[in-house]
Amino acid sequence: MKDLKITGASDTFFTPNIEFQGESGVCIISGESYLENTVEFYKQILDWLRSYMETMQPIDFHFSLTYYNTSSSKAILQIMNLLKDYENKGGKISVTWHYNPDDEDMREEAEDYELDTGIKLNIIGDIIK
Amino acid sequence: MLSNEELYQNYIIGQTPNLVLSYKGPFLEEILAKLSDIIRETFTQDPVISRKLLSIFIEMAQNVYYYSGESIPLAGKEYGIGYVIVSQEPNDIFKFTTGNFIPMTRVDGLIESCERINSLDREGLRQLKREVRSSEPGSEVSKGAGIGLIQIALTATEPMEYEVIPYDSEKSFFFITIKIKA
């Protein structure tokens, strides 16, 4: 499957870096997320994941965001729900939450997503640049 | 229209010690981006504090942008009008205030949200945020206890201060102040 690659930018809005590899199933979202149209931006990510999931290949997902606004946090929840559904249907997933070890709030966010979705996150105090 | 003398008096009276920024007008994305840059550059030493200041600023600004009872159409889009002032107080306290008109129909709900948020401890706020976030995934504009306000309260180090000043039969003016220790 074709890769999904979006280069992050920080101008009027903050676009995260997206690097989803169709071959290996390694998916990384990093940087900052505050977008003009959050729903539209994350739709392409959800669509890519849904197509990938048809292959039933394993997914190694990495969240490594240093900032996101509350609209983006709803989109992140949708990604987590989708990954959890995939696991429930027999898909193999590994989901890692990277955070700045000094930023306790971002660790709490990971715990809250676990409670919301029942997903198991590997929570690591180390950011992917 | 104010005379020069009145504008001068307004400016002098409005002088805030240790002002970081002050803006009144339509909350255009481009302007908010520049103001965000000022916020970030004010406190670059610590990326966590910098992230928290930015988070508070953006959520507060978005509340004005979406909910202000006064707006202006520009290039086919409707922009909320309001006021934002950020200052650095003694003991490394950053103070954020926004002010904007709100329609009368929203006053009770907004006060209720603020009271509810201020009555909760950190765990209660986290739980409320999770409830609100799960109840309407993907929705850009939340109603009631907006997730933005909850996020602001979670990031702040002191309870929110808010005040509603009656204006006329259709709208009131709403102030909210958030303090965070750097």
Image (tube, grey):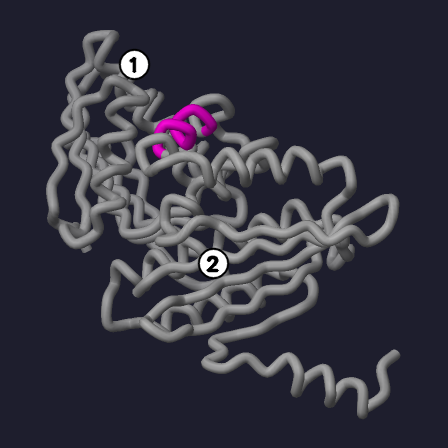
Q: Which mark is residue B119?
A: none
- Residue B84 image position (x, y, % from top left): 58, 65
**Residue found 76% across the figure and 85% down from its top:** B7
Q: Is residue B77 visible?
A: no
Seen in the picture, residue A50 relative to B35 is either above or below; the reply is: above
**Residue found 30% across the figure and 20% down from its top:** A117
Q: How many marks?
A: 2
Residue type at tag 1: Asp
Q: Quadrant of residue B2?
A: bottom right
Seen in the picture, residue A7 relative to B144 is either above or below; the reply is: below
**Where is the N terminus of chain B found, in terms of image quarters?**
bottom right
Circles 2 and 1 on the same chain: no
Residue at the spot of label 2: B57
Residue at the spot of label 1: A85
Q: Is residue A73 shown left or right of residue A114?
A: right
Between B64 and B110, the one lying in front of the other is: B110
Q: Is residue B98 shown left or right of residue B74?
A: left
- Residue range highlighted in magenta: B126-132
Seen in the picture, residue B5 relative to A88 is either above or below; the reply is: below
Q: Say few, some or many: other residues with alpha carbon within 10 Å of mark 2 (under 14 / 14 to 19 / 20 or more).
A: many
**Residue found 14% across the figure and 51% down from its top:** A101
Between B10 and A40, the one lying in front of the other is: B10
- Residue B131 lies in the magenta-colored region: yes
**Where is the C terminus of chain B found, in terms of image quarters?**
bottom left
The subunit letter for the residue under badge 1 reads A
Callout 1 secondary element: helix
Between A51 and B53, the one lying in front of the other is: B53
**Residue found 80% across the figure and 86% down from its top:** B6
